[in-house]
């Protein structure tokens, strides 16, 4: 009884951590604040996300180093064709417009796609893991799928965080060129939200391993290690019934004459193999 309560407690904690990680990772992927830069000469704040970017323009200076937000965010999708055309036209006039280089940060690069693929796949696997965990009390073998899916979700989420961290610290992604100065981008809160979800999934994976061990070990104890069945029952079921001689019925079979007697005389000698006649010999006196 105590073991069953422990299993349910571990299972509840694991599913709760997976659900919390899902909430954090979804909030992170829908936020544009993965990279944030304040371009002071334009009095604007640029937020560069994974699949969309936002700009907060017309920020008024209240004091030295302080800004007052007046306008809401204006966002656009990275995969929008019209936005891609605007970026291309802006980059063609890079000699006339000194701030055109900032448009490069609004493109949909390959590392954005890799991160999105890993995040979305990890979220799907985490949902499958929750389903397997819900089936574990009824189907003990589902705990294996529960553990495997939890570990896979952690691996994919760690890959997404690692790829973003390395890409965000590259020189061409870290610094933004304005008309006068160069500004450094900082990592926004969306990355830390996703990292918090990754940590939740790490804890869930450890608890999932513990839960699977307890479920499988308790199932072996209840069934004597073989699910409650005799390990040699297949031998007893496969043994043949003993043979009783009295149950056999004999029938006399009439004996025919040998086949050789039915053949005509001399016919059987035709098929005999060739045997040479013995060599003649001569007797001599000693």
Image (tube, grey):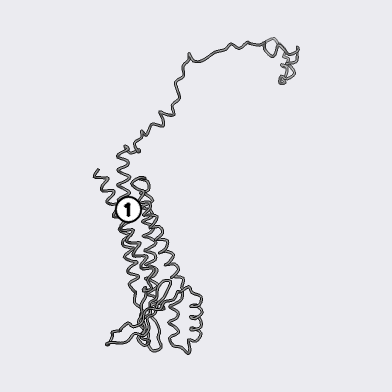
What residue is drawn where x is 75% and y is 12%?
264
Task: From this view, report whether residue 233 is shown above or below residue 97.
Answer: above
Say which element carries label 1.
helix
Figure quadrant of the N terminus: top left
Whole-percent x, y for residue 60 in the image: 32, 86
Tell me what residue is drawn at x 44 percent, y 64 percent: 117
Specify whether 260 is left or right of 187.
Answer: right
Quick check: 56 above or below 205?
A: below
Q: What percent of the width, then of the height, locates residue 268?
A: 73, 16
Residue at the extreme front of the image, as rendered: 71
Res 49 visible:
yes
Query: Which residue is situated farthest in the left direction here?
Result: 2
Q: At which x and y percent is residue 184?
A: 35, 80
Q: Position of residue 263 (x, y in %)?
A: 73, 13
| Left or right, residue 137 beside residue 121 | left
Residue tagged by mark 1? 208
Which one is nearer the viewer's eye here, 229 or 29? 29
Occupied quadrant, residue 235? top left
């Amino acid at each position: 009884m105590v073991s069953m309560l422990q299993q349910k407690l571990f299972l509840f904690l694991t599913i709760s951590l997976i659900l919390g990680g899902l909430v954090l990772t979804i909030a992170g992927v829908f936020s544009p604040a993965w990279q944030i830069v304040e371009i002071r000469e334009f009095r604007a704040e640029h937020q560069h996300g994974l699949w969309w970017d936002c700009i907060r323009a017309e920020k008024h200076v209240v004091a030295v180093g302080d800004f007052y937000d007046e306008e809401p965010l204006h966002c656009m999708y990275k995969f929008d064709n019209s936005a891609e055309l605007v970026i291309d036209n802006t980059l063609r006039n890079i000699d006339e417009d000194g701030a055109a280089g900032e448009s490069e940060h609004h493109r949909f690069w390959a590392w954005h796609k890799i991160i999105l693929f890993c995040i979305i796949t990890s979220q799907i696997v985490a949902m499958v893991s929750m389903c397997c965990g819900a089936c574990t009390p009824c189907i003990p073998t589902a705990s294996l799928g529960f553990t495997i899916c939890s570990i896979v979700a952690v691996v994919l989420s760690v890959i997404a965080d690692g790829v973003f961290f390395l890409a965000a610290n590259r020189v061409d992604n870290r610094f933004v060129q304005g008309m006068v100065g160069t500004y450094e981008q900082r990592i926004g809160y969306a990355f830390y939200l996703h990292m918090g979800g990754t940590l939740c999934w790490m804890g869930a994976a450890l608890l999932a391993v513990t839960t699977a061990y307890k479920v499988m070990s308790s199932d072996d104890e209840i069934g004597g290690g073989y699910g409650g069945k005799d390990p040699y029952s297949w031998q007893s079921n496969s043994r043949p019934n003993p043979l009783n001689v009295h149950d056999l019925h004999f029938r006399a079979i009439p004996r025919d004459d040998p086949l050789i007697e039915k053949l005509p005389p001399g016919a059987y000698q035709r098929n005999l193999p060739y045997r040479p006649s013995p060599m003649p010999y001569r007797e001599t006196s000693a």
